[in-house]
Image (cartoon, rainbow, N blue to C red):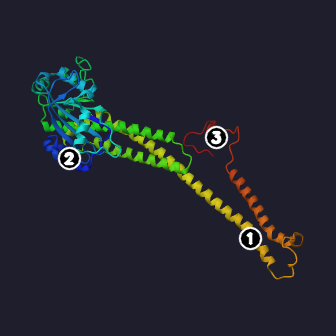
Amino acid sequence: MYHLTPQVHVPDDMLRPLSEALGLGRFTAHVEAAELLLPQLVLHERVSEVTLPPHAARVDGAAITLAVTPRRDPLLFVDVELADDADGADAIAETLYATWQNRSATRVDGVPLTEWLDARLRAYGIPDGPTGRPPLGFGRNVHQSVFPGAALARGLLTEHVPGDAVGQDVVTIVLRGTLDSDTGATLGIRRPETLNNAGQTMVAHGRGVSLIVGYAPPVENAFALAAAGILTAVAAVHRIRRQAFEALELDRAAAVETTDDARALVGQLSRRLNDLQLDLSFSVEAYADTILIPELLVESFHSSLRDVSSLADALANTSRIVERVNAVLATRRVDLETASQQYAEDRDRVLAAVIAVGSLIALPPALLLAYFGVNSSDVDSKRSILDIQHYGVAYAIAWVPFLLLIAVGLVARRRISLRLSGRTPPLPTGAPAARGRGGHGAAAGDAVR
C-alpha cells in the first residue's frame, strides 16, 4: 500500500465502495456504512505483466487498486502473487526491501506504474482540474502486508520461540532483512495477543510491514484496510505540518502596509487554517479511531499498528502546531481590527475637526452679517463694513468669545492629557523589594501590601 501525491480531485459520482475491489466478507456492511470516512474506489484492474524492481521475486500476477480518501489523497494497493520458488523468508524480505526502497522502478506493461495510473485515470475520464493536475508520484509512506503461502505458513505457525522473542523468519520478513535475525530479541516487532493463537493464527508487525498468517482472505483484507487508514493518517500528519510551516512563512514574509493588505493576508491564512483543520479531522483523527470497523480482530490490529506508528503522539503534536497557526491568525485579526478602528477614529476625528473649523469660520461672519443687516443707527450706510476703527467693538464681540472658547478647550485638553499620563507613576529607582515576615521575600500566596 503506497501513499501517492498529489491529491486527485475525483468527482463524487465516479467513486465506489472499496468493498467492490476487496473481498471483505462479513466486514462489508461496516465498510459500506462508513464509506464517507474510508477510502473509496477509483479503479481496480487485474494485470498480467508486472515487473517489480531489481532483486525482487518473480511475480505470477497482480491486481492494482487506486482509491482516494475523503480529502482526495490517493492510495494505491498493489496485490502481487509471488511465484512458488519465492516462497521463503529471504526471498520475501528482498522483495519487500526492493518494493520499499526502489518502488518507482515498478512497471506495468513496460510502463512505470505512476505513468500507467495517469493513463488509466485519463481513460476513465477523470479530469485534471482547471489548471491541470501534476503527474502522480510516490509519497514517502508505505505499508506492506505479507500473507505467506502454505509451506511458509506452516513453518511460521509451528516455530517455537522462548518468551517474548520472535522467530528468525518473522524478524527477516518484518524488518525486510535489514537486521540480524539471530539476536533472539523482539527488535520492536509487535505481536497482538488477541490475534496470536498457537498453531492456528499469527500476526506480527512493525511500523512498515505486517506478517499475517492463518486468517481467511476477508480478515486479511480488513487488516490491510486498517493498515491503509494508519498509512493515510501518517501521510496526512506530514502534509499538515508542512502546510502549517508554509502558513507561518507566508505570515512572516508578508508585506502588510495597508488595511487591504492585512485583510488579504487574513483571508489567505483563514483558508489555509480551514484546510489544516479539515485534514486534521478527516485525514488523521478519523483513522486514529478504531470504530470505523467495529470488530474485535480489526480493532486489535488497528490499535497495535497505531501504537507502533506513534500516531497518537503525532496527532497531539500536530494539533498543537495547528493551534499555533490559529494563534498567528488571531493576532493578525486583532491587528486588522485595531487598524480598522484606528482608521474609523481618524476619519471621525477629521470629520469633527472639519465641522468645528467650518463652524468657527461661519458663525462669526454670520453674526457680523446679521449685525450689519440691522436697520439701526449703529450701522452707518456710508461706511464700509471693513472699517475696523468704526466697527471694532462689533468685531470684538463677534470673535472674542470663539477665541476664548478655543483657548479654554486647548487648556482643558492639556490638563486632561497630563492627568492621564500621571495616573500610574513609575516605580522609583532603587525602591526596596517587598518583604514578607522575617525580612525574606514574600512567599507564594502571601499578600503584599
Q: How far, Cα to Cα, is label 3 from label 1?
A: 60 Å
Between 84 and 122, the one lying in front of the other is 122
What x and y, as percent, mark residue 83?
12, 25
Which of the two labelled residues, at mark 3 and mark 1, occupies the earlier sequence position?
Answer: 1
- Residue type indicated by callout 3: Ala
Amino acid found under the numbered disc labelled 2: Arg
Could you classify mark 2 by the number of other residues whose Cα lies within 10 Å: few (under 14), some (14-19), or many (20 or more)? some
Residue that mark 2 sits on: 16
As displayed, is residue 411 above or below residue 325? below
- Disc 1, SS: helix
| Quarter holding residue 383 | bottom right
Amino acid marked by disc 1: Leu
Q: Is residue 174 visible?
A: no
CB-based contact (under 8 Å), mark 3 and mark 1: no
Task: Please state if 222 lies on the left or on the right of 286 as rendered.
Answer: left
28 or 423, which lies in front?
A: 28
Q: Which residue is mark 3?
A: 434
Q: Position of residue 220 (x, y in %)?
A: 16, 35
In percent of width and height, residue 364 lies at 77, 70
Kindly check if marks 3 and 2 are in contact, taking CB atoms under 8 A apart as contact.
Answer: no
**Corner quadrant of residue 126:** top left
Q: Secondary structure at mark 2?
A: loop
Q: Earlier in the sequence, mark 3 or mark 2?
A: 2
Q: Residue at x 59, y 39 (%)?
A: 442
- At x 48%, y 48%, the residue is 266
Q: Earlier in the sequence, mark 2 or mark 1?
A: 2
- In this view, the residue in front, 212 or 64, is 64
Q: Identify the residue position indicated by label 1 in the image.
A: 363
Q: Which mark is residue 42?
A: none
